[in-house]
Structure formats: C-alpha cells, structure tokens
Image (spheres, grey):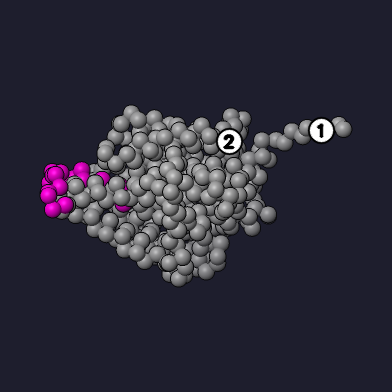
Amino acid sequence: MLMLQVDIPVDQKARAFFFCHHVSGFSKAYDVLEGLYEHSSKPLTASVDAVSLAFFDLLCYNEKASQLSRTRYWQALSLLNASLESAESAKSDETLLSVLLLDMFVKLTNHDPPPSEAWMSHIKGALALANMRGKSQLSEYTATRLANRVLTNFLVTCNSTHDFIPPELLQLRSALEPPSKDANAKWQLNSTTIEYTNLTAAIARGHLENAETTSRAMKIDSDFISFAQSMPQDWYPQTIYIDVPSDRIFERHYYVYPNHSISQAWVAVRALRIMLNDIARKHSPFQPSVTDHRGDAGSEPDVATETIDSLAREICASLPQYTLAKARNSRAGTNPVLQRIQCYTLLWQMYVAGSAASDGSGIKDWIIKQLHFLSDDIGIRDANYVAEVLKNGVDTNPWTIHNFLGTYAFIA
C-alpha cells in the first residue's frame, strides 16, 4: 500500500494549534475570535497568523515558525496601521482584537527587560481604542469581552513594568457594566490586584517608608484572603491523600480543581500573596526572632515566612493533577499537548513559591526536581531555565521570570 506524506505548511499547523489549544480548547480568553475570524479583515487574519506562529514556537519549539512569525507580525502591523486611518474601522471589534493579538505576540517573543516602547505600545493602543469606542458599545457580548481583555492585559503589563495603574484604565473599568453573579469573584480579584500593582510601583520608585510598605502589603494580603473566603463553594478543590510517598507529590496530598480556569485563579492569588508577604518580610522594621517555648509566633518576618511556606505548599499541591497519570486519566485524558500547556502555566507560580520559601521547608528542592521532570519527561524546555535560576539562588524579580516565560499569553 502506497503511503503519501502530506507536508502541511507551518502557518496552517500553527493556526490550527492556536485555535484548538488556546482559543477554544484551553483558556477561552479569546473565545470571541472564532466568530470574528470567519469573516475577518486582513489585519485580523494577519494578526492571528503572527501570534499563532509565536504560540506554536513557544510550546513546540519550531524555529521555522519563530522566523515566519516575525515576518507575519510586520505584515499585520502594516495592515493594521492602514486600517486605523479610518474612524469606522478603528472602532471595530476586529481592529481592537487585532491590536490585542499583536500585543500578545510582543509579550511572547520579546523577553528584553521592560519597560520598552515595544512592550507597551500595543496595549496602550488597545486601551485608547477601547475608551474611544465608548460605553454604548459595551452592551454587546463581544465588545464587553474585548474591553475586559484590555483591562486584564493592561493590569498584568503594569505589574511587569512596575508602573502605576493609569487613569485611562480606571476609566475603562468604570465604564464596564457590573459583572454578573458568576463573575463577581474575578472582579474582586481584579480590584485587589490593582491595589497590589500600585503598591509595587510605589516601592519601585522609593515613595514609601518601610513601615507604610509593610502596612499596605498586609492590608492587600488581607483583601486577598477575603477574596479566597468568598469564592463559590464549587470553586474549592478536592484534596487527594496518598498512603505511599511519591516523587511527584509533596507531603502526601494534592489538589484536584473543577477546571483549569479555577485552578489558575487559586494559584494566582497564592503567588500574589507570597510576593506580598515577601515584601512585608523584607521591609519590616522588625528582625526575625526565634519562636518561644509556648510556640507563639515571633516577629512580623516570622509570621510572613510561615504564611509564605503555607502558600508555597498549596502551589506544590496544585501541580500533581497535571503530572500524575492516574489523576490525568480520570479528568483530562492523556493529551500530551494539553498536559504541556497546563504544566507550563504553573512554571511562574512554581518559581514564586520556590524562590520565597524558607530554606528548611524543603519546598525549593522539591520544586527544582519537578521542574527537571517537566523539562525531561513532559518536554517543557523553559522549565529547566526556571530550575537553573532557582539553583543559582540569585534574587531575580518574579515578574522578570513571568516576562521571560510568556506567561502573559495564558491568563484567563
């Protein structure tokens, strides 16, 4: 029997991969793309080509896709600039989505330390377009989804660059309709994250004394605790206990979440809380002390360290559901691509946990072993990079790692 080998062009592979594993099959953050793409304009088509090639390269390490993605990016940018000359076209959903996709492309391919003009230009343009479109357009599902995407992406970008939240972003946020009951939890998370972002921007500029820094960090941490306590009951994970120790499980238990979006919300809150407690620990006017004979907590740094270790353990417990064959077979099947994406989205939080946990907790060493496993067995090359950064012990800002990994692309 004669077998024919079909050579599918890399751009077609990448486009199918992007739609299957990102647009409709994973985060659904860009679910509106499917409807708009059917009759899309040239700028949107070109933008999809650019970002899908970059996304394909990020997870499949395809050099041909990497090279072609840059060519398609410049083509898309030229088409988009021409489209923006028309007032009608500039206000369209397709144009705003094109800008958001080109912003994602830059975040996936530009690992230079921000801030840089390239890093900020597209998301600034998306915010300007979103506000120009006005509140009247926010009655439509697609427009609301795109506006919320601008809000989330700009917020994460400000964290990456240690910038304050601009008034224009708050203007967009106030224009959005009050979220539905199901969206209330994430809306509250968004509000508290804004406070965190402004705090880190103030710290980066030396605007605060140590006492005020610690006080504000602990206040925001308290708000995150309130958010976690207000989560719907069906958001809580199931805890699975094991009798026999496993190299893949820390402290003989792990979490299974209802879905990946909920898992992302939980681990994101834990990572942000770890960073807040690390801020409090570093800026506290008090010194760490030895716990007294009654077992009472010592100084503020001691309490912060205990909180960090507790949160880091919870992040450790969130990984095995994606790495254990038994857990995966019962929930998501054995799709290796989906497994790679799910594990990739946890790399940043694993770094946050490993870099901040106390030396005696064993957390850092366990995380380094898991990162090597993800690199060697799951095929996530960047996991080895994160492991090496942790091994070297250099105090690298977590957002630097976030930028390098392109974690921006996976935010739900």
Q: CA distance from mark 2 to mark 1?
A: 24 Å
Q: Position of residue 54 (x, y in %)?
A: 56, 38
Q: Eyeballing the image, is 6 above or below 134?
A: above
Residue 178 visible to an observer of this rendering: yes
Q: Which SS class for mark 1?
A: loop
Q: Eyeballing the image, is 117 above or below 277?
A: above
Going from N to C along the chain, the mark reached first, 2 or 1, is 1
The answer to which image quadrant residue 361 occupies is: top left
- Which span of residues is magenta-colored? 271-295
Return the residue at label 2.
Answer: 60
Work out whether residue 335 or residue 320 is closer to the camera in this orientation and state it: 320
Q: Residue at x 49, y 37 (%)?
A: 374
Q: Is residue 84 magenta?
A: no
Q: Position of residue 330 (x, y in %)?
A: 57, 53
Q: Which SS class for mark 2?
A: helix
Q: Eyeballing the image, is 345 above or below 236?
A: above
Amino acid beneath label 2: Cys
Q: Residue at x 49, y 33 (%)?
A: 375
Query: Which class describes the residues within 10 Å of circle 2: few (<14), some (14-19), or many (20+)?
Result: some
